[in-house]
Image: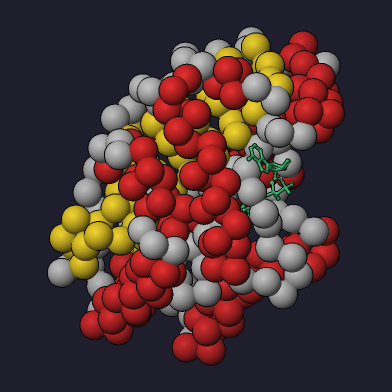
């Protein structure tokens, strides 16, 4: 059982800590935030629930030393979307925060795997990779794990089946240019294109369009209503943490560096990859239609343009 260090004790960081605590993911969870009163209060509140969770230690503070010796450092610090803002609008501000904090993280936790959650997550993952010079396997972005979960939920709801029996991925940017990989989607091993089961319906083109629109607008909708997204991202990140710390070799659509995937390279985006203790492996050779591939290429270009625009 390892130690998780979390940078940022805001809505996302604190909820990841809560999810990790109740799921027994680590022996120690340490929160770091520059907002001292906030981080101390979150740590206190989590400690008050220790009795009801698997055994763990929770601590934190405004000194980066709390991250010392972490096996995985989760980056959630930074600006979040205000209603109407896109994730890409946060690139400049959140890159500056990474520039400030990551060298300090490397000093106290040089062996840690970095799990980036701060948005725009694909841009931030590439910036982190370049700033830290860590091997590509050890810098992971939460990517479209959350978007794919939203996607699977909506398909499952439409077809009235358990979400766990839907296998389908969103690839590319965690953001507006993301791509649904319909061609490889299945329910209980039946390709979605062939799904036609009495009382469980089928998916028309209009249904598919509606689902994709809903996935893309999901964060905007939640932010409009409550100011932040936290529960689903908390569980999604916890799922990635389990894959890493328990060396599960789980297939997850995390963001990571492409080093020659269908001719694409030198950009971080999401595709299904095997995730374990060593971090990420190269993307799996998932089948794609011509349209899906060209959409992925456009998404890659969009991310690349923002990263280059920031000077990385
Ligand atoms: P928040 O405002 O609630 O929390 C951010 C925290 O970061 C604050 O507590 C702040 O004090 C802290 N912080 C700022 N600068 C810091 C620094 N230099 N060092 C340490 N801490 C610092 O925001 P949130 O809702 O928790 O969102 C955090 C980030 O996560 C945003 O960028 C948001 O867009 C992103 N996010 C990503 C996903 C995803 O799937 N990747 C999902 C939801 C949110």
107 displayed left or right of 96: left
Residue 192, located in which quarter of the rendered image?
Answer: bottom left
The residue at the point 38 percent across, 23 percent down is: 110
The residue at the point 79 percent across, 23 percent down is: 40
x then y, percent, for residue 160: 59, 65
178 relative to 167, above or below: below
91 displayed left or right of 15: left
Furthest residue to the bottom? 206
Residue 112 or residue 97, whichever sits in front? 97
x then y, percent, for residue 262: 17, 68
Q: Is residue 142 visible?
A: yes
Residue 158 or residue 201, whichever sits in front? 158
How is the structure coloured here?
A: secondary structure
x then y, percent, for residue 184: 31, 67
The residue at the point 37 percent across, 53 percent down is: 126
Residue 17 or residue 267, whichever sits in front? 267
How many marks the image carries: the answer is 0
Q: Is residue 240 visible?
A: no
The residue at the point 21 percent across, 67 percent down is: 264
93 relative to 57, above or below: below
x then y, percent, for residue 57: 65, 12
């Amino acid at each position: 059982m390892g130690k998780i260090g979390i940078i940022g004790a805001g809505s996302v960081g604190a909820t990841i800590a809560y999810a990790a605590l109740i799921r027994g993911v680590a022996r120690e969870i340490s929160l770091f935030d520059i907002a001292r009163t906030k981080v101390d209060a979150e740590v206190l509140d989590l400690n008050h629930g220790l009795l009801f969770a698997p055994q763990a230690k929770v601590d934190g503070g405004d000194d980066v030393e709390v991250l010392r010796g972490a096996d995985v450092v989760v980056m959630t610090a930074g600006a979040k979307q205000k209603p109407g803002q896109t994730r890409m609008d946060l690139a400049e501000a959140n890159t500056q925060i990474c520039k400030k904090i990551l060298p300090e993280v490397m000093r106290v936790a040089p062996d840690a795997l970095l799990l980036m959650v701060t948005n725009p997550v694909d841009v931030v993952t590439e910036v982190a990779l370049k700033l830290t010079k860590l091997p590509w396997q050890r810098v992971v972005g939460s990517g479209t794990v959350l978007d794919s979960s939203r996607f699977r939920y909506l398909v499952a709801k439409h077809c009235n089946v358990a979400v766990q029996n839907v296998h389908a991925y969103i690839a590319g940017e965690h953001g507006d240019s993301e791509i649904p990989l319909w061609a490889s989607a299945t329910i209980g091993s039946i390709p979605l294109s062939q799904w036609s089961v009495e009382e469980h319906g089928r998916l028309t083109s209009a249904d598919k369009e509606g689902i994709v629109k809903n996935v893309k607008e999901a964060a905007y909708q939640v932010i409009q209503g409550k100011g932040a997204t936290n529960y689903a991202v908390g569980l999604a990140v916890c799922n990635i943490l389990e894959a890493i710390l328990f060396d599960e070799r789980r297939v997850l659509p995390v963001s990571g560096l492409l080093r020659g995937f269908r001719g694409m390279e030198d950009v971080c985006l999401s595709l299904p990859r095997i995730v374990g203790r060593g971090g990420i492996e190269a993307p799996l050779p998932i089948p794609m239609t011509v349209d899906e591939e060209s959409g992925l290429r456009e998404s890659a270009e969009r991310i690349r343009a923002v990263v280059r625009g920031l000077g990385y």
